[in-house]
Amino acid sequence: MEDRLFIIVMNLFVYIILLILQILTPKITRKNIYFGIRIPEEELNNEELKKIYKTYVIENILISIPSIAFLSYWTYNSNSPIVVTLTIFIYIGILFLVYLHGNNKMKKLKEEKEWKGFKDEVVVDLKFSKNRASAASISFWWFLIPVGIALINLIVGLNISSKLPKRIPTNWDFQGNITGYMDKNFFIWFMPLVQLGMTGTMFFVCKIIGWSKQEISAKNPEESVKRNIIFRRIWSVYILVTNIVLNILFTLASFYSFGILGGSVNTIIILFFIFTSLVILSSIIISIKVGQGGSRLEFDGHYEERNRDDDRFWKLGSTIYYNPEDPALFIEKRFGVGWTVNVGRPLGMFLMIVPFIIIVFTLLLVS
């Protein structure tokens, strides 16, 4: 009973965070992009835009209340781990449908108002393009910190291997009872390899941040480049810090399994919960303060963006970028903060599909 209630509370926390992000996202994208649609900057204070956003917030709340209630009831009455994960993805799908409704409203409004006064102005800063990986990303050497933490985990495990039982406890219920074991020789290597794999992934993400196509304002190219570099560096540092703290937590979890650390397993669970909350909260704060591409950074003077109207390349509510003629593989997301891939390129299509394959495969393993 207590385990089920804990899972419900954890899922409820995830639902609320997802709902908050859903409501805030239109406010943290580039100022001249509203619900994934590019609009003239002089129309940002249009009353109809405010009305669309207000309706969007109300729809999200009204639809989320019964959806969360039903999904929580389903989770509570199910003993399947796959349902716990599946309900979160279902809720994400529900929120996406609400967003699509707002996106369609914006498309219609743009057509009705005939906001077509954009010029296909393309600005490329060759210096930034050439040096963006070094200018915007952090040094490779910083990632030796999380690598070192993983190696400490491995070295400690190997040194005390002879003192450990053949099977090491790896899973506990919320009363502290052991519910799962793993062979010690496998576990000693397993956790450090997971940490190293995660570090490699984080490093690759930082490289993507440097490689991704820059979106430069035709009206303020110099300031736009400056904002872009700050934006990329902030998120690179965020990823590195997240990686370091995660590796520390994983190492503490290993030490608990080894018997080096005493106390209740709930301490580890609480630490993970606190850290997860801080990661999410800090990402929200950064998104609000920095904005997509650094568009919300506070500089002296008024900043105005002017870019070409490329709505035609964005599909499925402006969430998928398809442009075979664009050589860029990684580009800024249209809705939200971060980057996505150009599925108009074969490698981009592959990178788009792979995460879904991994999710399905993982769910099948769990079930």
Image: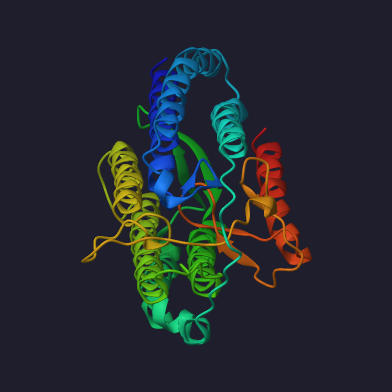
Give the residue at x 69% y 51%. Answer: 312
Where does the N terminus fall, quadrant-wise? Answer: top left
152 lies left or right of 349: left
Q: Quadrant of residue 146?
A: bottom left
The color scheme shown is rainbow
367 lies left or right of 55: right
Q: Position of residue 114 (x, y in %)?
A: 59, 42
Q: Residue furthest left?
A: 300
Front residue of 170/218: it is 218
Q: How many marks?
A: 0
122 lies left or right of 324: left
Front residue of 231/34: it is 34
Q: Quadrant of residue 139?
A: bottom left
Name above or below for residue 75 compared with residue 34: above
Front residue of 108/346: it is 108
Name above or below for residue 233 compared with residue 319: below
Q: Position of residue 332 (x, y in %)?
A: 53, 60
Q: Position of residue 122 (x, y in %)?
A: 57, 71
Where does the C terminus fall, quadrant-wise? Answer: top right
Give the residue at x 60% y 25%. Answer: 83
